[in-house]
């Protein structure tokens, strides 16, 4: 299983955000949606062994964890706008008890630490300056943790360190979150894991 | 210079396509827009040494070539919808004479072969089953050619072969066009070229 946890520090947690302004009023929801595509989509379908976990920390009712399970999700599209509509529906469920609100989409109110506890068991923190992924052994069944266009907060970084996360880098350039996920997927594909 | 030519076989060539249905009525314009993002965007800006050339072959007035030059373009965003508005404006110029219709965006009526002649000088055709990019020497100053979610037509493939294009693959899985560009960019970044 390949899990990607993406932290959206400003991503709004209201179920009626506008589909017409994902990058603006929705708090860079486009970053989370592009990341989910990179985690889940192949040319001709969905990666059955992948999960995209999106943590939304923007107003008005954070924190929210939305998990999209590749082997169960239906009606997940390359089109960001369609997927944004799926997230809107999932945000209607704000209970701390996780529920499958539509096929393959789990929603709950959960913090970063709670999300880590629920995902796991081992963690890879993708960060500029980390050990180059090429040639670095990766733990089996890992959760890869990425931030949006902001850094993880010091508190979030501490949570990673306390869980012995492996800190891994992807190359010489600072790239977008979805681009980072594409590189990880390719590396795992090549290793056949 | 890194050039990426992406062929949108169904991408519409009307300047008033709807921003609300990029994946549907606009003929998978979302593929071209995501590809342009992968070609041009870094975490904190635009790749100055990159060009995204988009060939639109859908109705009503194909073929159209829209070139986005990293070192000149302004107001290019991660948000696909904003960039779609730039393409709409560029489609208003349908002359065979190429013109810079807004800073860093060149538009013209041009076929696949004409696009190749204008880009060049050497070509890399990204295709499943090609020689693995890792460890394969790549020509300097190359144009990387990719198709949308359809294969290149036999005629387009012949045009590539007649130009001695190097056929390169990226890994064991069939992936989306934008994902392929992300992998090429990372490989070139690592080589420092």
Image (spheres, coloured by chain):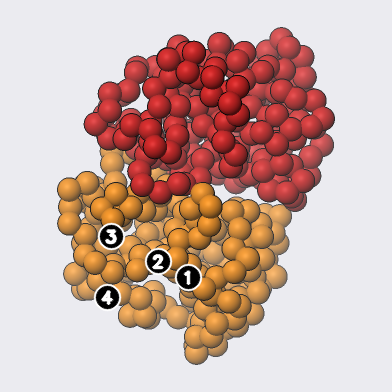
Chain colours: A orange, B red
| Residue at mark 2 | A49
Q: Which corner quadrant of the image does residue B126 belong to?
A: top left
Q: Have a look at marks 2 and 3 and say if they share a chain.
A: yes
Whole-angstrom CA distance, mark 2 to mark 3, is 10 Å
Quarter the N terminus of chain A occupies: bottom left
- Secondary-structure class at tag 4: loop
Identify the residue at image location x=52%, y=73%.
Answer: A72
Q: Is residue B178 visible?
A: yes
Q: Check residue A71 in the rendering and tell me which mark sits there, or answer none.
A: 1
Q: Check residue A132 in the rendering and tell me which mark sits there, or answer none.
A: none
- Dots 3 and 4: beta carbons under 8 Å? no
From the viewer's perspective, is B14 left or right of B63? right
- Say few, some or many: other residues with alpha carbon within 10 Å of mark 4 (under 14 / 14 to 19 / 20 or more): few
In the image, residue A15 above or below residue B154? below
- Say few, some or many: other residues with alpha carbon within 10 Å of mark 1 (under 14 / 14 to 19 / 20 or more): some
- Dots 2 and 1: beta carbons under 8 Å? yes
Q: Which of marks 3 and 4 is nearer the N terminus?
A: 4
**In front of the other: A40 or B162:** B162
């Amino acid at each position: 299983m390949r899990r990607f946890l993406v932290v959206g520090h400003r991503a709004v947690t209201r179920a009626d955000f506008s589909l017409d302004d994902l990058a603006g009023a929705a708090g860079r929801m486009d970053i989370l949606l592009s990341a989910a595509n990179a985690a889940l989509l192949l040319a001709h379908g969905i990666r059955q062994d992948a999960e995209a976990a999106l943590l939304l920390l923007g107003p008005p009712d954070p924190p929210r964890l939305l998990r999209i399970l590749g082997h169960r999700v239906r009606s997940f599209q390359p089109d960001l706008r369609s997927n944004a509509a799926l997230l809107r529906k999932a945000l209607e469920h704000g209970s701390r008890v996780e529920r499958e609100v539509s096929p393959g989409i789990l929603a709950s109110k959960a913090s970063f630490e709670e999300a880590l506890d629920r995902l796991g068991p081992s963690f890879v923190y993708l960060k500029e300056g980390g050990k180059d992924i090429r040639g670095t052994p990766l733990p089996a069944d890992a959760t890869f943790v990425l931030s949006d266009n902001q850094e993880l907060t010091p508190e979030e970084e501490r949570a990673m360190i306390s869980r012995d996360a492996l800190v891994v880098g992807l190359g010489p350039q600072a790239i977008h979150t979805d681009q980072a996920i594409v590189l990880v997927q390719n590396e795992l594909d090549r290793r056949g894991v």
